[in-house]
Each structure stands twice: as C-alpha cells, then as structure tokens.
Image: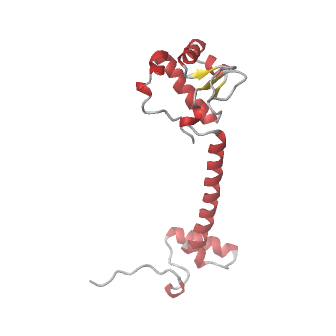
Amino acid sequence: MTWFKVDDNLDGNSKPRTAGLPAMGLWTLAGSWSSRNLTDGRVPNWYVETWPGGRRHATTLVDAGLWHRPNHSCPECPEITNGYIFHDWTQANPTRAQVEADRDRKRAAGRLGGRASGRTKPEARAVAGAEPDAQARATADARAGAPRLLPEAANPRPPPTRPDP
C-alpha cells in the first residue's frame, strides 16, 4: 500500500489558498488515486471529469501552480502528453520505480524470513526426516498442544529455566 504524502506546511502555502477548498479536494483525491495507481503524479482527463466541476477545479489547480498540463514550462516536472501532472510530485511522494523496488525487497525479505521460521519451529525440528503423513500429524498435534514427539534432551533449544533466587 502506498500513501499520498502531503507536506505539513501545505496550509501555510499560498497556492492552496489561491486554489480554494473545492479544488484542493480534487487535488487530494487525485493524489490518493495517483499514489495507489503508481502514475508518478499523472492524472488522466477521464479521472478529473468523473468529479462534479472537475474540469473547472483542475483549471484552478493549474492556474495556482499545483498541477501542470501538457507543454508546461516547469523545468522540475516531467512533460506529459495529456491530462495533468502534480507539480513536484517526487519531492514528497515515491516514484513507481521506487515503490516497486521496495515491494520486491520486502517480498524477498519475507521469503527469507518464512524459510528461516520454518527451519526453527519446534514442530519442524521434531519431525525432521519423518514421512509426510507423520509430519502432518506432528504439526497438527503441536498446534493442538499435544506433547512433544522428542524428549527434551533431543531439543537443541530447551525452554529457559528460572534461576534460583
């Protein structure tokens, strides 16, 4: 899940005050949509037109300097061929490439963690090398609170003991 990030000084900036509350509502909703859909701040015409007064509010956002149209002159923002784009999207929000790289990294870490967890769970150690049916029974027994299959001496990680006072 991504988040549309808004600067906590936004309320003190003159651009939102120039745009007004209805246009800032569109700005906020379009930011949420763009972040969820990983569009790097690009907002298509059809999305704007799904909102009452959408085109009018979008024009207000462009006039206030919060959005750009195609052929804009802002050197910090990428060019677009249609629709709108948020001004300075990447100053507060991650790009699609950054989000996908982060998701890939988290997926890989999750796989490694799952494998490590499987190697260290008591029921997995208790039935190492057992037949698949025996493994399934041991796992079900362990989850149900049944006694362990191996004596404590065979457990490489016995439960900790409380020291005598």
Count every numbered label the image shows and give the total. 0
Q: Residue at x 65, y 48 (%)?
A: 101
- Relative to 162, 77 lies left or right: right
With respect to residue 28, does 105 lie above or below?
Answer: below
Give the image location of residue 79, x and y in percent: 69, 26
With respect to residue 165, does 26 lie above or below?
Answer: above
Q: Residue at x 56, y 15 (%)?
A: 63
With respect to residue 54, does 77 lie above or below?
Answer: below
| View extreme (right): residue | 81
Give the image location of residue 94, x and y in percent: 59, 40
Give the image location of residue 137, x and y in percent: 61, 72
Quadrant in the rendering for residue 49: top right
Quadrant in the rendering for residue 132: bottom right
Quadrant in the picture for the C terminus: bottom left
Colouring method of the image: secondary structure
Quadrant in the picture for the N terminus: top right
| View extreme (bottom): residue | 153
Q: Residue at x 62, y 19 (%)?
A: 48
Give the image location of residue 16, x and y in percent: 47, 21
Q: Nearer the viewer, residue 46 or 127?
A: 46
Q: Residue at x 46, y 33 (%)?
A: 7
Quadrant in the rendering for residue 105: bottom right
Q: Nearer the viewer, residue 157 or 49?
A: 49
Q: Nearer the viewer, residue 160 or 97?
A: 97
